[in-house]
Amino acid sequence: MLNEKEVKLLLTWANMAQKILDTAEEMEICELKRRDQIAILHALKETQIKRNEVKDEEGTCINFTVDAGDMRIAVRFYSGANLRDGFEKRIYDCRIEISSRYFDEECAINDFINILEKMLHEETTIINLTPSAVTFYAQDGKTILNTIPSSGVARAEQTRESLGDINGIPVCKTIYGRVEGLPSPQENTIYIVPVLTAQAASGRDDLFIVDDLVRDPSGQILGYKALARI
């Protein structure tokens, strides 16, 4: 998932680009005058978002990418020249691409703004698939933020293979197989699962485990301060 800082940086940039488009009465960045294209490119560079350069027979593309596993955003500037030979003077296109497990699309600046604003205001649903309710605390370890009741249990199927014994005590090898009780991925939804379940379904990027224990003076677990990925 994209973090809030990255979304806000992209939204600030997109609003600035849209303002330039509106002033110039144009629909796309490639239709703007060169100075406006350069201003938009420089503004995106100032966000410090990760970027790389790709060259081919048609010129050069600078990719600005934000990748959070379950979603990827790429803003691409295309030029007929490379970075050393006047990239900014020969910009001919700019594309915004958003992809996730649910969709893969190219969008205009105004649509991009709407998507980013939705990301900022849309809450993620957290489903607890562990045996007990999970309570989350603030970093002070005292303030309760939320308690999420159990909605079932996602378990990794287990089989045991005998390896013999040690001093008469049986020794087994435990093998973990398919996961039971785990729903299919859903948009804007994550699942809290047991550690073994997360390990058995390591290909899923919507599974989290609890992290950073909060204990009472006797050592009893009260809750957690964070979520973690395996």
Image (cartoon, rainbow, N blue to C red):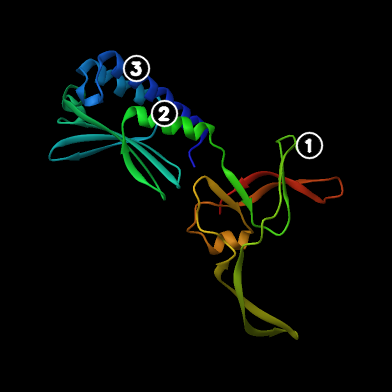
User: 114 or 90, which is in the foreground?
Assistant: 114
Q: CA distance from mark 1 to mark 2?
A: 35 Å
Q: What element does badge 2 sit on?
A: helix
Q: What element does badge 1 sit on?
A: loop
Q: Quadrant of the C terminus?
A: bottom right
Vertical relation: 191 (above or below) 118:
below
Q: CA distance from mark 1 to mark 3?
A: 45 Å
Q: Is 93 displayed left or right of 9 in the figure? A: left
Q: Earlier in the sequence, mark 1 or mark 2?
A: 2
Counting from the top left corner in percent of width and height, residue 209 is at 62, 52
Residue at 40 percent across and 25 percent down: it is 47
Counting from the top left corner in percent of width and height, residue 10 is at 41, 28
Residue 7's disc is none
Vertical relation: 137 (above or below) 14:
below
Q: Earlier in the sequence, mark 2 or mark 3?
A: 2
Vertical relation: 38 (above or below) 104:
above
Q: What element does badge 3 sit on?
A: helix
Of tags 1 and 3, the one toward the viewer is: 3
Of tags 1 and 2, the one toward the viewer is: 2
Q: Which residue is mark 1?
A: 142
Residue 19's disc is 3
Q: What's the amino acid at mark 3?
A: Lys
